[in-house]
Image (spheres, helix red, strand yellow):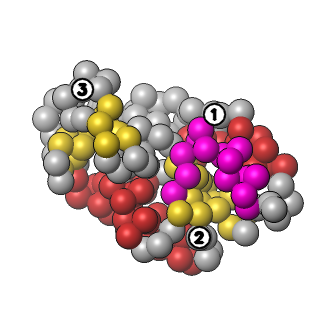
Amino acid sequence: MNVLISACLLGLACRYDGQSKGYSAVEALLKEADIHLIPFCPEQGGGLATPRDPAERQGGAVRTQGGRDVTEQYRRGAAMALNLAKTFGCTVAVLKEKSPSCGSGRIYDGTFTRTLTAGDGVTAELLKNYGITVVGESQIEKFLSQALT
């Protein structure tokens, strides 16, 4: 099974702050011989630098804390993620929670106050629209127990 995964969860320093966001449950994914991880950072793929200004979704747009509209870069990165998922036949994506790109179910509300609201990041939304299951990093163990039974 090929699984698209946020590159930051694998320890790659591609987050907006130039850091990675390794998560211990990812180790379990790496140990599974039947699971092949396809890493990708949609924000970098869309042309944004690392580090970069923090951004949040504001309705249909994505804006940086300084007010710059980066919606097009987020959409381009999401399209690249979808293309990669299709190329490798990924039916599941493990994505970084709360991100304006990868968040699934809950994202920051666009006020830059770290307030969460219901919603999906641009990439998570696009992948879901194409029938790809999106799993956040806190759901990896549950995903594994279901996928390997």
Front residue of 139/88: it is 139
Mark 1 residue crowding within 10 angstroms, few (<14) / some (14–19) / many (20+):
some
Q: Is residue 134 left or right of residue 88?
A: left
Asked which secondary structure carries label 2, the reply is loop
Q: Tell me the kind of residue under disc 3.
A: Phe
Query: Relative to the observer, which residue lies in front, 36 or 73?
Result: 36
Residue highlighted by disc 1: 22
Q: Position of residue 87 (x, y in %)?
A: 57, 78
Q: Residue at x 83, y 55 (%)?
A: 32
SS label for mark 3: loop
Location of mark 2 (residue) = 91
Which sits earlier in the primary sequence, circle 1 or circle 3?
A: 1
Residue 3, placed above or below residue 99: below
Q: Amino acid at mark 1?
A: Gly
Magenta stretch contains residue 145: yes
**Which residue in the structure is indicated by mark 3?**
112
Image quarter for residue 33?
A: bottom right
Q: Can residue 62 be seen by looking at this rendering?
A: yes
Can you give x and y, in whole percent of width and height, for residue 96 in the image? 50, 43
Badge 1 or badge 2: first in the primary sequence:
1
> N-terminal of the two: label 3 or label 2?
2
Residue 132 placement, left or right of 109:
right
The location of residue 92, given as percent across then percent down, is 59, 63
Q: Which range is magenta?
A: 134-147
